[in-house]
Amino acid sequence: MRFAFRLWRRFAALSFAREAEYRANFLVNVGEAAIQVTLAVLTLLLLYRYTDQIAGWSQAEVLMLAGVYRMVEGLIALQIAPNMLAISGAIRRGDMDFLLLRPVPSQFLVSTRLMAPPELANVLIGLGLAAYAGQLAGVALDARRLAMAACFLLCGLLLLYALWFGTVTLSFWLVQVDTLDQLFYGFFEAARYPVTFFKGLVRALLTFVVPVAFATTFPTEALLGEADWRMLVAGVGLTALALAGTNRFWRYAVRHYSSASS
Amino acid sequence: MSAIIVEHLTKTYRSYRREAGLRGAIAGLIRRETTVTRAVEDLSFTIEPGEIVGFLGPNGAGKTTTLKLLCGLLFPTSGRATVLGHTPSRREPDYLRRIALVMGQKSMLWWDIPAMETLLLHRDMYRLPDQEFRRTVAELSGMLEVGHLLGVPVRKLSLGERMKLELLAALVHRPAVLFLDEPTIGLDVISQQRVRDFLRDLNRASGTTILLTSHYMDDIQALCRRVLLIDHGRLQFDGSLAALAEAAAPHKILSAVFAEPPPAEALREATRDAVRRPTDDPRQVRLAVPRAEAADVAARLLQLGRVVDLSIEEVPVEEIIRVVFHAARQEEAQP
Amino acid sequence: MILRTLWRHVACNVAMTLEYRGAFLIYMLNTIAGPLVALGVWLAASEHGAALPFGRDQLVTYYVLLSLVVMLTGTWAAMFVAESIRTGSLSPLLLRPVPPILDYLGNNIGEKVIKLMLLLPLVLVVGLLFRDDLRLPGDPVLWLLFALSLPGAAALAFLLDFVIGSLAFWIEDVNGLVRVKNVAGAFLAGQYVPLALFPSWLDGFLTAQPFRYTISFPLEILTGQLAPEAAAQGFAVQLAYCAALWGCYRLLWRAGLRQYAAAGA
């Protein structure tokens, strides 16, 4: 475990070193993050001009969710996305050969070696927005709520990772898998809003199939003191299953890897 | 104990063929034509620790596939390979820590940042004690003369410099076996020379077993005492280059330049045991002579007139290879 | 000759896009996802008593057709133009007897042909799902005006995008600028929230700014929100913006090419 953490720290160091080479880019990214969050907040303000409450959510509460959403989006873009997007290219170009020959578990290596430091801006902005909105909503924070929220958040992130990683593993066989990533971003859009805004089939889809609910709605509910214990248990179980599943699938894929010939 | 033991190693691929177009796509769902590609077939050989062995063969012969099977990147269809006492395809961490792979056309270094950062990454991945790591880096960068390049972003370096740093990165964990796939491809002549010198020095100093595949005869000639010829996935020859030359080319090339073209009758008489080779210059005579006769024929030529230049050379290895492959293909063609 | 060249460009791009239809299908699914999510949210809002100036039917009509309009007026040339200027790959295009913009225009139109074929069935499916609330106008004049407003909208969007990408003649990295324009522009065009739902004190500004004319204007016509004079005025403004942007493009490229040649690319 310490090995994993030490290695991850080294990965981060390399990504930050790389980012330092392109300083101007960093500022642009931060600027973009600021604009995106502004537009997101404006959209919500427009929404709540006409009503005080939607499906039991007040404006401040939805703003809190928007903050959590931004944080989650930032975390995914920071740590998960760079790696997922690089996998199919690595397979095609043959760089995967090097990765498979390191004395490091390959799924870990392939999933954590890259980072996008500018996205920290999104994470911090999201955190800030959530904190501010939480204050407006009069949320009383305690350790229990925070722990539950963090748990939901972790489950959500890992579930989304598992889904994305599972799909990307298909690149060992299919060529055009890159575009499936696009589909996730489309679904992820729905995570901006509480899952309770949607009904029936769509809500079930967003909770269990593309589990955005775990990433944004449930953590926010936990902070508001409205978390559902059963969902947490279900989430943890689902996460454990999903991660085990992806590992199985990955190991199968790697065994049958035919390695681009030179 | 031998470093590498290969027994009847075979790797076949199954691929599907279908017709182009929409009709083909639909038909392909129902029935597909399977083609079986035998990338590597029934390979058997043994390599002792400290050897430098070259894999030679035409494109698509199976050299790189063999290399990848020995690294552990590919799963054999049948047969067995044992490297340093391990089964490569299991990719055990202990095994992976003792080998290294360098590929001529692909890079393991991070592009935008100095090579030193990649080296630190390797240090952490292979769990090398810091002192030992620094010592190894100093030693290897001295041998490769790249010490001053460690802090420069890799994208700013030339191809030759990058290849040297690739080697450094691959060797920083002191592997017992080094696999090289076309390491000098694309490099200028000087860089190629330096890489070969380095590999030779490395082998001498650390006893690292080196396996390399190459298209360049110069690599093979400069480095490898032993050559494995692979064609159509099969091992065609396993031995030294000298033995190969003897077996495949039992003659030498004799070349003489006269002050004036020698009389035709006398020339024919002198060169009756030899095969004339074409030349542009009427004053030059080129012959393929059986090894045993070479000296005699040379003496006879010297009698024919004033000789300005005389040389006796080995058949170029490319030609030997071509002969071997041609013979092998002919053998295969025969029922 | 220009038209024939353009036609050839379009044909090539159609073939190319057809090759990647799997990928483009997924882009289209994405194009439709955004408006659907927004629609779901606004419907949820109205169900919980929000007093919208929009009827439910207008809301549904707007969002169902939104993805079509977004796709038809979409543009992505900026980053490619900027890159070709930066890397020098613009040079071969300059040796042709037709202006480089034709290349990008052909690509734009060609891709849209296939995208339309892929998107239309999806929109029909969504339309069927919401058929109870879908209120398509029966008046053929509205449809005609809608159709007329689309080329102008697409041209405006394309020219704006192209002009910004052309700033690469002078600015090293315009990608950030392009992304900002895309995000802010989409917002101001009514791609996330119909402009009619914005605070009324912004009306003047919103109706005048160029982004309105790329997406909101056609939809406003179709959902019957515009009185005839307002619509006529809108067309005039749309045309004016197009002309102005065309002028910008010509000026920028004349100056820019001088700069480009001077740099010895």
Image: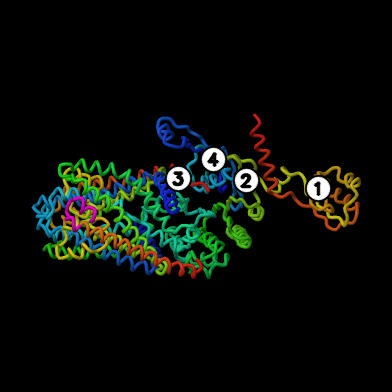
Q: Which residues are magenta?
A: C216-230
Same chain, labels 1 and 2: yes
Q: Are marks 1 and 2 in contact (CB under 8 Å)?
A: no
What amino acid is found at the position of numbered circle 3 in the picture? Arg
User: Residue B303: x, y in percent?
Assistant: 91, 52
**Label 1 to label 2: alpha-carbon separation:** 29 Å
What amino acid is found at the position of numbered circle 1 in the picture? Leu
**Label 3 to label 4: alpha-carbon separation:** 20 Å
- Which of the pair A38/C244 is nearer the observer? C244
Residue A147 lies, with reference to residue B268, above or below; the image says: below
Residue at the disc numbered 4: B39
Same chain, labels 2 and 4: yes
Q: In terms of sequence position, does the residue under pointer 2 or pointer 3 come before the other?
A: 3
What amino acid is found at the position of numbered circle 2 in the picture? Leu
Mark 4 closeness class: few <14, some 14–19, many ≥20 residues within 10 Å: many
Residue at the disc numbered 3: B90
Same chain, labels 1 and 3: yes
Instruction: Label 1, secondary structure: give it.
Output: strand
The subunit carrying tag 3 is B
The subunit carrying tag 1 is B
Instruction: Label 4, secondary structure: give it.
Output: strand
Instruction: Label 2, secondary structure: give it.
Output: strand
Q: In terms of sequence position, does the residue under pointer 3 or pointer 4 come before the other?
A: 4
